[in-house]
Image (spheres, rainbow, N blue to C red):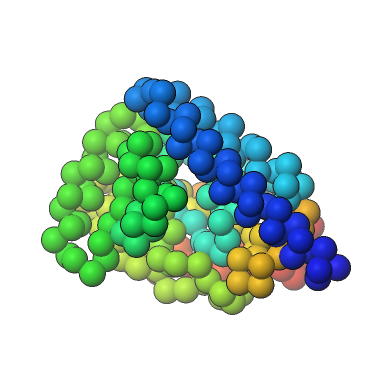
Amino acid sequence: MRIYARIRAGIFWLFFIISVLCVILAFCFTRDQNKIWRIRRIWARTQKYTIGHQILLEGEFDPEAGMIVMNHQSALDIIALEEIYPKNLCWIAKKELGEIPLFKHTIKKPKLLCIDRKNPADLMRVLKEAGERLSEGRVLAIFPEGTRSKSEKLLKFQSGAKILSDKLSLKVQPVLIVDSAKILDTKNFTAQSGTLKIICLAPVDTRDEKWLENTRKLMQERLDAERVSPN
């Protein structure tokens, strides 16, 4: 079974790279962000052909949310949200991702945001560009852990999400992704079919100074409960 899961992972990543190159090529023929968004959604849907996963959505995305915050375990997190989220997401990623040749154009053309976490002055640029994306009807998407968690515990949430919320007066909705690494595990290089559960939690009260910390606790508690009783 392990060997089969690794073969499937190899097939997935080969298809992933080829499909991303196709997306970059398709981007060359348009500057229309709505068309670019449709290309991204089609790309996300095609990834199911190599993994064979299904998505189970619990709850509803808040149409008034200006930002969603999610836990992060796998590349499948981005793929799944790109497929099912009803609005054009503007992902906020670390600067290092934007320096990878394969992803450079897939970040620049859809006008996603990269932030240099080591340079506090870069925050002003990100705030300005995030405001522009919101004015275009887009929704900010961020992994406040800053990187993928390698355990069953969420990492400490970084302050970027709170700064964006405070400065831009955003309504924030947490979205819990349940154990995506069990389907697509980058660390152990395995992939297997399964059902990915995505839970839309209630929007948070950002008037609470500790809302980010409290949101992490809530998400961890819900995640633990899902593991005990997945049904």
Q: Position of residue 114 (x, y in %)?
A: 31, 53
Closer to us: 119 or 15: 15
Q: Residue at x 59, y 76 (%)?
A: 151
Q: Residue at x 35, y 68 (%)?
A: 158
Q: Residue at x 74, y 65 (%)?
A: 6
Q: Residue at x 44, y 50 (%)?
A: 102
Q: Quadrant of residue 65?
A: top left
Q: Which residue of the protein is positioned furthest toward the right in this rendering?
A: 1
On the rendered image, what quadrant is the N terminus found in? bottom right
How many numbered dots are placed on residues in this image? 0
Closer to us: 121 or 156: 121
Q: Position of residue 149 (x, y in %)?
A: 53, 71
Is residue 35 depicted above or below 9 in this figure? above
Is residue 171 depicted above or below 74 in this figure? above
Q: Is residue 183 visible?
A: no
Closer to us: 160 or 200: 160
Is residue 170 depicted above or below 142 in this figure? above
Q: Quadrant of residue 99?
A: bottom left
Judge left or right: residue 131 versus residue 7.
Answer: left
Judge left or right: residue 195 versus residue 185.
Answer: right
Q: Position of residue 98 (x, y in %)?
A: 35, 54
Is residue 211 depicted above or below 166 in this figure? below
Q: Is residue 107 visible?
A: yes
On the rendered image, what quadrant is the C terminus found in? bottom right
